[in-house]
Image (cartoon, rainbow, N blue to C red):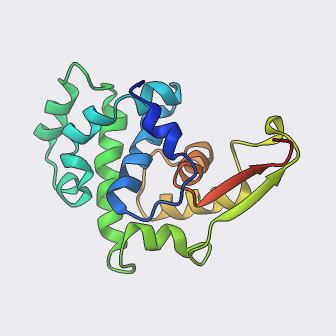
């Protein structure tokens, strides 16, 4: 099995577990400028470097923790993206003053039910949606990083918050 198979196997299934959501967001951050396969194949590396995706622990990272991650030869060693993951962990912690969980925050946009988008054919499925752009803006306002419209749209689709249904299949 390819190291990224897990990602395509779980793509679009509704995720309501915070560590899994944090992992998917992290993949989205690292995917910017790369293929989804390159980012998703680093799951084990991300788990190892980001405390099994425990965002509370990652939020407490110091600069030397980030420097250690940058030295991991298996890591995608982009310092801006590594710092963005730490910043996103801190933003998730910040959400907990208002929401029970990161999942509650994301799913609250659609009252806990996936937003279904229907398309006549696969070539009509966009990688940017107005609904995702609204969430991206809210996330940025709350301190998240690397959450532009494309990254956020793909993250929400991966997490099953937004689901594409292609009618010609």
Q: Position of residue 51 (x, y in %)?
A: 18, 47
Closest to the observer, 64 or 167: 167
In the rendered image, the quadrant that contains the N terminus is top left
Residue projecting furthest to the top:
73
Q: Number of labelled discs?
A: 0
In the rendered structure, the answer to whether residue 131 lies left or right of residue 70 reads: right
Q: Which residue is rendered at x = 44% and y = 24% of the image?
A: 38
User: Residue 34 placed where, x, y %?
Assistant: 50, 25
Judge left or right: residue 46 versus residue 141: left
Residue 140 versus residue 150 in the image, above or below: below
Q: At 33% across and 25% down in the image, what residue appears?
A: 76
Q: Position of residue 155 (x, y in %)?
A: 53, 49
For image coordinates 43% across by 30% down, the residue present is 4
Residue found farthest to the left: 64
User: Horizontal placement of 126 versus 80: left or right?
Assistant: right
| Relative vertical location of residue 89 with respect to residue 97 in this rendering, above or below | above
Task: Locate residue 28 relative to residue 82 in the image: left or right.
Answer: right
Residue 45's image quarter?
top left
Say which of 26 and 6 sits in front: 6
Q: Nearer the viewer, residue 107 or 62?
A: 107
Residue that appears at 36% across and 44% down = 84
Query: The C terminus appears in which quarter of the rendering?
Result: top right
Give percent across and percent down for residue 33.
Answer: 52, 26
Relative height, residue 90 to residue 113 (above, below): above
Identify the image quadrant of residue 43. Answer: top left
């Amino acid at each position: 099995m390819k190291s990224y198979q897990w990602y395509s196997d779980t793509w679009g299934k509704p995720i309501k577990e915070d560590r899994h959501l944090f992992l998917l967001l992290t993949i989205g951050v690292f995917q910017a400028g790369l293929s989804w396969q390159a980012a998703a194949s680093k799951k084990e590396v991300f788990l190892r470097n980001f405390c099994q995706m425990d965002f509370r622990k990652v939020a407490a990272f110091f600069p030397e923790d980030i420097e250690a991650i940058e030295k991991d030869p298996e890591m995608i060693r982009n310092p801006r993206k590594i710092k963005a993951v730490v910043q996103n962990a801190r933003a998730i912690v910040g959400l907990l003053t208002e929401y029970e969980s990161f999942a509650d925050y994301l799913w609250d946009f659609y009252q806990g039910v996936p937003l279904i988008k229907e398309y006549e054919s696969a070539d009509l499925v966009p990688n940017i949606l107005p609904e995702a752009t609204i969430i991206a803006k809210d996330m940025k306002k709350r301190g998240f990083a690397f959450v532009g419209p494309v990254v956020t749209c793909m993250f929400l689709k991966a997490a099953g918050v937004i689901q594409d249904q292609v009618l010609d299949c």
